[in-house]
Amino acid sequence: MTGKDAEKSRSRPHQVQDRNPDQGTVLDRIKMPPMSGEEALRRFEEDRSGDNATQQQSDLAQLHPIMKLIALGGTLLMVVTGLLGILYLFAA
């Protein structure tokens, strides 16, 4: 590089390879305790099992099996109708 080019590249901090640590991304600046993958999975499983005990069942899980079947059929009917409508728009 010539002297002029070198001065231009140093004036752009995003192109400088050896950046200061405080110029990193937000994630680089977050102080996190060191944690192995196994520890992270263990904590995730603990949080998940704790949430399941206090979580209420969804509305669909509380329905009678026949009503679940009707809801599934209605959903499939709506999806097929939407796809046929889109197909009709392209054919027209």
Image (cartoon, grey):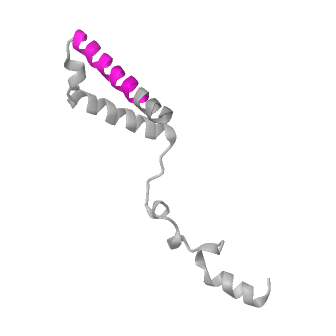
Location of the N terminus (image quadrant): bottom right
- Furthest residue in direction bottom, as rendered: 4
- Furthest residue in direction front, as rendered: 92
Q: Quadrant of residue 19?
A: bottom right
70 or 85: nearer the eye?
85
Q: Main secondary structure of the magenta part?
A: helix
Residue appearing at x 52%, y 72% in the figure? 23
How many numbered discs, if any?
0
Q: Is residue 25 left or right of residue 12?
A: left
Q: Is residue 59 left or right of residue 69?
A: left
Magenta span contains residue 2: no
Magenta span contains residue 77: yes
Where is residue 41 drawn, in percent x and y?
44, 36
Where is residue 63 drawn, in percent x and y?
20, 17
30 or 81: nearer the eye?
81
Where is residue 3 drawn, in percent x and y?
76, 90
43 or 16: nearer the eye?
16
Residue appearing at x 54%, y 70% in the figure? 21
48 or 11: nearer the eye?
11
In the displayed structure, 65 sits above or below 56; it is above
Q: Quadrant of residue 67?
A: top left
Residue appearing at x 23%, y 26% in the figure? 58
Q: Is residue 60 left or right of residue 26?
A: left
Instruction: Tell me where the magenta segment starts and ends, as one range.
Output: 65-83
Q: Is residue 15 left or right of residue 25?
A: right
- Furthest residue in direction top, as rendered: 66
Where is residue 78 drawn, in percent x and y?
33, 25
Residue appearing at x 73%, y 85% in the figure? 5
